[in-house]
């Protein structure tokens, strides 16, 4: 009985001089930088009011 | 004499190590700081979310890892549920590292070691490096051709930098034990220390935080009434920590 063969897709690589990076890794880095920038610029939702009427955080 | 002063005299004179340990814990993270429901205004930013996102991902990593350890390689390689849990383990690790890197960037650019927070920074940095080692041994523990290939490549790399004599990445039993016992234990202790230090010293403020952001920071205590603290306006190099501000209030309340 033959063992199942697993076909792995060929990874795409980008070259720039001595720098070589796979497309997947580059996308992950871009995603993390995007998350970092969005975390800095996006407004945080307002806090809930508690029963005593004081906000969760001061404005 | 306040209640805290009396307690300190009692602790110094106590030969009971249980009492000394209990009081040490109370002094390290006073009552009201463990799970605070109030934070300073500057915490109202998405950049402060990534630390707790790391913790959430780590919980999923540990839970899925326990399931994999209980069922074994014969399960995660062949069954549908095993494949699923294996993938959950992998992707929660990916998210863990992604969140941790953004958390690291945020803390680096706000110089999070300010205000006596050096040990918080150091424990986080060591936990990050340790997590890389844990993830690496995880790749070696897959028990497939991928893990064999990675071990072969890593053996050459580690020998090249001169640390190959300390452990053998081709020894799958040793690497599996590193992955499921030694390194998780180290990471777990470091993470607990990191969280305790964050709770003790508070969240680091941004550079442009106004003194008003520190003043009258509210900390709820179980008794007798919620305390309103007056914290000294900060200096960039000597930022007051919540613990320093909380201690006299607790003392006066007791």
Image (tube, rainbow, N blue to C red):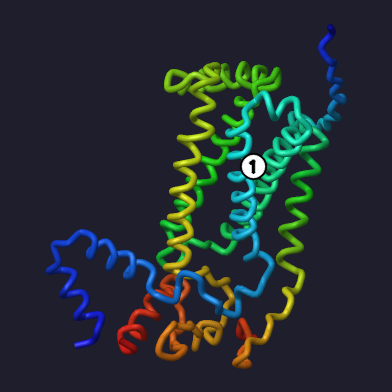
Q: Chain of mark 1?
A: B
Tell me the element at label 1.
Answer: helix
Residue sitting at 57 percent across and 60 percent down? Answer: B107
Instruction: Residue B84: give x, y in percent of width and height.
Output: 75, 38
Instruction: Residue B83: give x, y in percent of width and height.
Output: 75, 33
Image quadrant assignment for residue B104 = bottom right
Q: Nearer the viewer, residue A1 or A4?
A: A1
> Where, quadrant-wise, is the C terminus of chain B in this rendering?
bottom left
Residue sitting at 47 percent across and 88 percent down? Answer: B226
> Where, quadrant-wise, is the N terminus of chain B in this rendering?
bottom left
Q: Nearer the viewer, residue B72 or B165?
A: B72
In the image, residue B6 sits, relative to residue B116, either above or below, namely: below
Is residue B240 something one can see in this rendering?
no
Q: Which residue is mark 1?
A: B64
* Left or right, residue B183 beside residue B92: left
Image quadrant assignment for residue A44 = bottom right
* Left or right, residue A45 beside residue B206: right
* Number of marks present in the image shown: 1
Q: Nearer the viewer, residue B161 or B151?
A: B151
Is residue B252 something one can see in this rendering?
yes
In the image, residue B198 sits, relative to residue B146, either above or below, namely: below
* Left or right, residue B51 beside residue B95: left
Instruction: Residue A31: give x, y in percent of width and height.
Output: 78, 50
In the image, residue B141 sits, relative to residue B128, either above or below, namely: above
In the image, residue B42 sits, relative to residue B83, either above or below, namely: below
Image quadrant assignment for residue B157 = top right
Residue sitting at 43 percent across and 55 percent down? Answer: B193
Residue sitting at 60 percent across and 36 percent down? Answer: B135
Instruction: Residue B15: give x, y in percent of width and height.
Output: 13, 62
Q: Residues within 10 Å of mark 1 (few under 14, many from 20)?
A: many
């Amino acid at each position: 009985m033959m063992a199942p063969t697993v076909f792995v897709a060929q990874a795409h690589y980008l070259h720039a001089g001595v720098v070589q990076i796979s497309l997947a890794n580059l996308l992950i880095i871009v995603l993390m930088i995007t998350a970092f920038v969005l975390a800095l610029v996006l407004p945080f939702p307002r806090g809930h009011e508690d029963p005593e009427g004081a906000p969760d955080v001061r404005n | 004499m306040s209640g805290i002063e009396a307690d300190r005299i009692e602790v110094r004179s106590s030969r009971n190590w249980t009492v000394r340990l209990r009081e040490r814990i109370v002094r390290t993270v006073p009552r009201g700081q463990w799970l605070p429901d109030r934070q300073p205004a500057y915490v109202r930013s998405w950049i402060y979310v990534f630390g707790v996102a790391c913790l959430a991902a780590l919980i999923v990593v540990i839970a899925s890892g326990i399931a994999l350890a209980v069922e074994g390689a014969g399960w995660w390689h062949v069954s549908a549920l095993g494949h699923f849990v294996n993938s959950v383990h992998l992707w929660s690790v990916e998210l863990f590292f992604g969140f941790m890197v953004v958390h690291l960037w945020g803390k680096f650019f706000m110089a999070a070691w300010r205000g006596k927070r050096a040990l918080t920074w150091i424990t986080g940095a060591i936990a990050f490096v340790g997590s890389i080692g844990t993830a690496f041994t995880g790749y070696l523990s897959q028990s497939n051709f991928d893990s064999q290939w990675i071990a072969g490549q890593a053996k050459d790399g580690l020998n090249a930098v001169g640390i190959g004599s300390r452990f053998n990445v081709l020894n799958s039993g040793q690497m599996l034990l590193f992955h499921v016992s030694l390194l998780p234990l180290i990471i777990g202790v470091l993470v607990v220390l990191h969280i305790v230090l964050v709770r003790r010293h508070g969240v680091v403020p941004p550079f442009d935080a106004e003194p008003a952001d520190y003043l009258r920071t509210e900390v709820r205590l179980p008794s007798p009434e919620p305390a309103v603290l007056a914290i000294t306006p900060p200096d960039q190099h000597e930022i007051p920590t919540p613990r320093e501000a909380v201690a006299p209030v607790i003392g006066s309340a007791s």
